[in-house]
Amino acid sequence: MNHSEGAQSPPYFGMYPLPYWPTSSQFLLMMNFQNPMMSPIHNLGSPILTSHLNFTQPTINYDIKYEQNSQNKESTQTKQPQQYTSQIQIISEQLDDMNYDQITVENLEALIHLLFAEEPKLKKIQQQLKEKRCLKVVKILDTLAKKIRTQQKNREELIKFCLRKAFREIFHQIQEKCTKKKLNLKAASKIFQQTYQAEKMKSIALPFRKNSKNKTMNNHFLHELFQSKQFQDQYKIFLDNLDTIIENDKNKKIKAIAEKSWEFIQSNRKSYTFKRLPWSLKNLEKLKETANEMLNYCDDQKFI
């Protein structure tokens, strides 16, 4: 449509004057554009609208997104060392042929392993133990399970465990390197202190000794300890062996519990107590996180 000079000016679109009279199709497009339910984009800042605008929707790869969510979910679950997982599988298969009428100390040790590994198969075994009236075995497993559920380790306990095991591992490393004569752990610890003093030009009092001033774990001591390059290198070797150290510690403690439990079954005692339990999977996961976080003390400006 042509408009002569002095005719009515084209209308406004929002706050902008249009430079032309829109056709009906263009006007419909503009009205839809103003409707937030019809258009994904608003306030473009341009007074000119054209009918060839094309609003594309982003493509989402749902397979990749689902896979990433699954991986994140798996990463939050407690993971056991592969070697211990294989051990639990073998133990679980062996118990398929267990004679419920004649429980042995080996059976008992295997059951306790399944308990600490949170093996689902144990529930069925416990039900069979009840049916076979193996009441003392049931009591042992129930008592241990209750203790595991209430087992909570605070940060100081986690750090103490790490340092105890780390120092013991370091002293063993020193023993292996000393070929001239066989060293005991006490002599190996003295060599560690001497090498630390030679490196840092100051002495360090090892913790957990009877007369040691380091009775608790504090930031100052840990920061001072991790400033030693020698200790850093030795501690990293300890971290590489941490899964094996945890596994050996678990096996040793479970064996001791099984032997004491066997004595309880053979006796006429009605009460059952135990000491030095292995740590639960939840606490072991926290332990591994803490063990790696302690490397932050290597940073001269950073404290945990």
Image: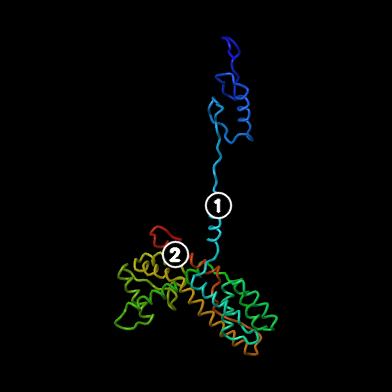
Kindly indicate the quadrant of the structure image that contains residue 52. Answer: top right
Residue visible at 50% across and 80% down? 252
Residue 26, percent from left and from top: 60, 24
Residue 287 against residue 265 in the figure, above or below: above
| Secondary structure state at the residue bearing disc 2 | helix
Residue 285, percent from left and from top: 52, 67
Q: Nearer the viewer, mark 1 or mark 2?
A: 1
Image side of residue 214 versus residue 202, left or right: right
What is the three-letter code of the residue carrying label 1?
Asp
Kindly indicate the quadrant of the structure image that contains residue 4. Answer: top right
Residue 114, percent from left and from top: 58, 75
Image side of residue 189 versus residue 101, left or right: left
Residue 294, numbered label: 2
Residue visible at 55% across and 33% down? 54
Is disc 2 surrounded by few (<14), some (14 to 19) or many (20+) residues within 10 Å? some
Q: Quick one: label 1 or label 2, which is nearer the N terminus?
A: 1
| Secondary structure state at the residue bearing disc 1 | helix
Decide which of 241, 297 is in the foreground and name it.
241
- Which residue is the site of mark 1? 63
